[in-house]
Amino acid sequence: MNLLSNYLKYLKLNKNLSTFTIRNYSNDLNDFYTYMNKNNITNEKKITKIIIREYLSSLIEKKYKKKSIARKLSIIRSYLRYLKSKNIITENHAELIHAPKSTKTLPKIIEKKEMSKLLETPKYNYQNGTRDQAILEIFYSTGIRVSEMHKIDLNHIDHNQQNIRIFGKGSKYRLVLFGEKCEKSIKNYIKYSRNKIKSNNLTNALFLNKYGSRLSVRSIQRIVKKYMLMAGIKNNLHTHSLRHTFATHLIEEGADIKVVQDLLGHESPTTTQIYTHTSAKHTKEAYFRSHPKAKMNIK
């Protein structure tokens, strides 16, 4: 398992992957090693195309989703590519295997009326209301990831230009914008809540817990889920749904896809393209649900 430990260190130091991504790599590769040990395969040189196929078949039998199987194969492929670069193996047999084609599902989003209700909900929580409202406003105003929200420091926010410098995937920075309502919620939180929290950590983090430490990713996820339930949003939505909602609502209002791509921090426009399909589907559903004669057979 020293090889695996070295690979995980390589991902952190050379690839600048996040802690959460590395954890996923570790979990998937440990699962693969567990399968190999059960089949008495103790040497990485014995990882053949047949072994990998049989492992994937075992995942299908366990009712794993095609998307999960494709991810595991991709991680195994990357790991074997690393081993080959270190001359530990001579062939990367995972390169010869195609991932199962998964049915593309459009991301779920929150309706505009529901979103307005969600943003108002923290007002009824007086203890952490200003903090939680600022979190929701930033999510919807910027479309950032929860891991990016977790990393925001006070000096990342430019109140004059109304932007935030975000440290995103691949250790790259980008600027995201926010409007007046979001600006007001951030200032309210800092003035009436954050500045009153006693902290021995001298942290520059924007969002703090009651102990004065940086708010964790899990805590942010729990906060968002709590308010979604309070607002009556129960369709298995989460923090990333706010990112989907941000992008879809922008495109519905006529934003250029290149602008949305830049704001989301996507490397390729293909990744952003899905929101045009979501927007079209959402528009169609809204039409047939709302137009008084949409369901009538008009001749």
Image (cartoon, grey):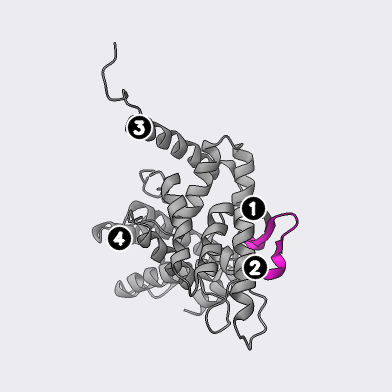
68 or 121, nearer to the observer: 121
Local crowd at mark 1 within 10 Å, few (<14), some, or many (≥20)?
few
Is residue 54 visible in this depiction of the protein? yes
**SS for callout 4:** helix
Label 3 or label 4, whichever comes before in sequence order? 4
Disc 1 marks which amino acid? Glu
Residue 111 colored in magenta in the image: no
- In x, y percent, where is residue 158? 73, 60
Q: Residue at x 46, y 37 (%)?
A: 279
Q: Amino acid at mark 2?
A: Asn
Q: Contact, CB < 8 Å: mark 2 with mark 3?
A: no
Write the residue at 39% across / 66% down: 226
Which quarter of the rendered picture does the C terminus lie within?
top left
Residue located beneath label 3 in the image:
290
Q: Nearer the viewer, mark 4 or mark 1?
A: 1
Mark 2 vs mark 1: in front: 1
Indicate which disc, 4 or 2, sits on the residue closer to the N terminus: 2
- Comparing 177 with 186, the one in front is 186
Cβ atoms at labels 4 and 1 below 8 Å apart: no
For marks 2 and 3 on the same chain, the one whose residue lies earlier in the sequence: 2
In percent of width and height, residue 67 lies at 38, 53
Residue type at numbered disc 3: Ser
- Residue 59 - label: 4
* Mark 3 → mark 1, Cα distance in angstroms: 31 Å
* Distance in Å between CA atoms under marks 4 and 2: 30 Å
- Which residue does the numbered mark 2 point to in the structure image? 14
On screen, 200 above or below 262?
Answer: below
Disc 3 element: helix
Amino acid type shown at disc 4: Leu
- Residue 180 marker: 1
Sequence-wise first label, 4 or 1:
4
